[in-house]
Image: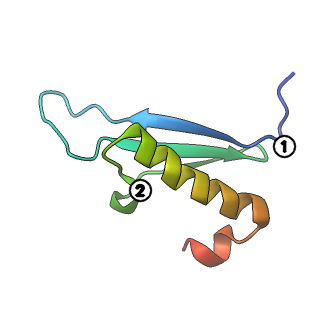
Amino acid sequence: MKDERATSIELIRDDYGDLVHPYPWRFAITHKGVRHEFCGMPNKCATPGAALSRATKRMKWLEDGTYAERYK
């Protein structure tokens, strides 16, 4: 059984077809059963590691309750 309180990160690689994009990686975070998908340019990353690093910071904000103050 899946724990709805658990927080998880999903890394997403956008497919631009034949085009090469310098920042193809983005991420989604599921926190307390709610999925937050980060799609805007400030959340695009060049590598999976960079996306994971940025997602980890956003996840911390969700877990400590400061997300609404920091991310508008």
Identity of the residue furthest to the bottom in this view: 69
Judge from the rendering whether residue 68 lies leftward or rightward of residue 27; answer left or right: right
What residue sits 79% from the left and 47% below the top? 32
Q: Which mark is residue 5?
A: 1
* Residue type marked 1: Arg
Instruction: Give the vertical position of 18 relative to 65 (above or below).
Output: above
* Residue type marked 2: Asn
SS class of the residue under badge 1?
A: loop
Task: Give the percent coordinates (x, y) of residue 15.
Answer: 28, 31
Task: Give the percent coordinates (x, y) of residue 19.
Answer: 12, 35
Q: Quadrant of the N terminus?
A: top right
What residue sits 59% from the left and 58% below the top? 57
Residue 47 occupies quadrant: top left
Q: Which residue is mark 2?
A: 43
Judge from the rendering whether residue 39 lies leftward or rightward of residue 58; answer left or right: left
Task: Give the percent coordinates (x, y) of residue 25.
Answer: 37, 41
